[in-house]
Amino acid sequence: MRKATRTQWIKCAIVLVLYLAFLVWVKSWLGLIVVPFIFDIYITKLIPWSFWKSSKNPAVRNIMSWIDAIVFALIAVYFVNIYIFQNYQIPSSSLEKSMLVGDFLFVSKMSYGPRVPNTPLSMPLAQHTLPVINTKSYFEWPQWKYKRVQGFGKVKLNDIVVFNFPAGDTVALHNQMSDFYTIAYSVGQSMYPGKVDMDSLTRKQQREVYDLYYNAGRKQILSNPKEFGEVVVRPVDRRENYVKRCVGLPGDTLQIVNGQVMIDGKATENPVDLQFNYFVQTTGPLIPEEMFRELGISKDDQMLMTNSQGWEGGLLEMGLNGRNAQGALNPVYHLPLTQKMHDALNGNKKLISKIVMESEDYSGQMYPLNLYTQWNRNNYGPIWIPAKGATITLTDDNLPIYERIIRAYEHNKLEVKDDGIYINGVKTDKYTFQMDYYWMMGDNRHNSADSRYWGFVPEDHIVGKPLVVWLSLDKDRGWFDGKIRWNRLFKWVG
């Protein structure tokens, strides 16, 4: 062992101080096992870490230098992704026009405090699946319990938040964009044709209908892997990343009345670019592509209803009955519009004859699936959002709302028997929540699969806060035709 130089001692001291400060921050004393290795790298040099540098074979030196650089880069990216920031791409239109499809974001892990990973042995930059070879990007073992490092603050009302999809714990691989529970319920429901009069059933009977549909659908999915794909279970930090706006905080009572979000009975401030779906009928001509570009409506969002069969009856019921000289319906589009876009179209009387908001017949099944409420996208709740340490009395009316929290998120055994509710084998009608929960919704209110469909977001699912759009690409345009949205580059997310 050669005697260490003064410079080596200084470098070792700086690295050790920084590393120990990191361990104090993350409160992980297990990391002390790395300290002897750091000391050896700089001082004792008992382990030949850079043995390849003394090789006489230039090919070995060249290859090993690349391997050394790649390993260092992967380790650096791993820790930066976990504790500092992560790159994220907006994949869907659920937050338009606040966020656009094709926006690339820097997501700050420091804003709400970085999570210590549940699955520490994983490949950087791959959420759950390795590309090309199509296998898991993480090892199931070890599994660490939820812990969050101190950050700069907490989730606030109207923050745009990146989080792991809560209902993504169970996934049918051929249907990864839809949650397993809704798919199972829908499949099971289709196996029992005929409408059930839910109004005439007791809460117990409604629950039995749900269990019948869900269990039948689940069995069908598991027995048909060719159609639905393999069914896998994912830990919290390996579930899909979603981005939505937080519209309800722990302890809030949320209600949606005619599209307006209310918190504790008071209307909240709406996002500037809030969107709803509308049916837009023209006076005869088609809406020109230049107008769609000016309005910012992508090709994926331009649906010409009168090009499809079977829609005429429904359009006539909405009062969209304008016809041309040949007796055919004038063009009707299905479009997501902000109020500004709505007013711009509605003011063009030469081109637009009528605009009608999409009805709630298109809402679909709302959360919770096993509670008959008649809630829809525009009229929902009231629903209380659980706060850590708060205790509620469980009833037939609220148990379906909170049972997923009790079972899946807080890992209790919940049973409903004839004589009452049992949690972990103990009969009770009370429950105290162990985590804070949030209510997340998209600004594109009629095109967003959000908390109205799959419920609460637990605090251990929170990933971070988008800070800035560092790149934005319009997939409808070419590289020499405005593909790069220059006006969005380095735009702060609000």
Image (spheres, rainbow, N blue to C red):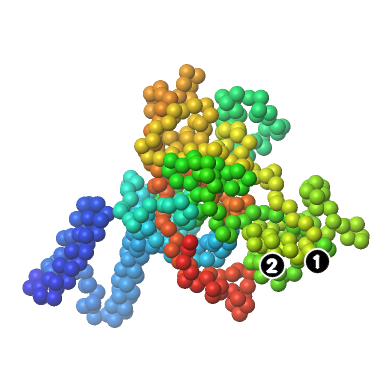
Give the secondary structure at mark 1. Answer: loop
Cα separation, mark 1 vs mark 2, equals: 16 Å
Between label 1 and label 2, give the one nearer the viewer.
1
Relative to 417, does residue 41 appear above or below in the rendering? below
Quarter of the image with the N terminus in it: bottom left
Q: Can residue 13 be seen from the camera position used here?
A: yes
Q: Position of residue 483 (x, y in %)?
A: 59, 74
Residue 343 lies in what quarter of the image? bottom right
**Residue 131: which disc?**
none
Relative to 217, does residue 358 appear above or below in the rendering? below
Q: Position of residue 96 (x, y in %)?
A: 58, 60
Q: Which residue is mark 1?
A: 350
Q: Amino acid at mark 2?
A: Phe
- 417 or 103, which lies in front? 103
Q: Position of residue 415 (x, y in %)?
A: 46, 27
Relative to 447, does residue 59 appear above or below in the rendering? below
Relative to residue 273, is residue 42 drawn left or right? left
Q: Position of residue 444 (x, y in %)?
A: 59, 55
- 397 or 463, which lies in front? 397
Residue drawn at (57%, 33%), measured in percent from left and top? 371
Label 1: how many residues lie within 10 Å, few (<14), some (14-19) or many (20+)? few
Q: Which residue is mark 2?
A: 292
Residue at the farthest front position? 266
Residue drawn at (41%, 27%), measured in percent from left and top? 430
Q: Can residue 413 be seen from the camera position used here?
A: no
Q: Amino acid at mark 1?
A: Lys
Label 2: how many residues lie within 10 Å, few (<14), some (14-19) or many (20+)? some
- 141 or 13, which lies in front? 13
- 268 or 491, which lies in front? 268
Query: Is disc 1 in contact with disc 2, using a CB cutoff of under 8 Å?
Result: no
Relative to residue 102, is residue 410 drawn left or right? left
Residue at the farthest left position? 3
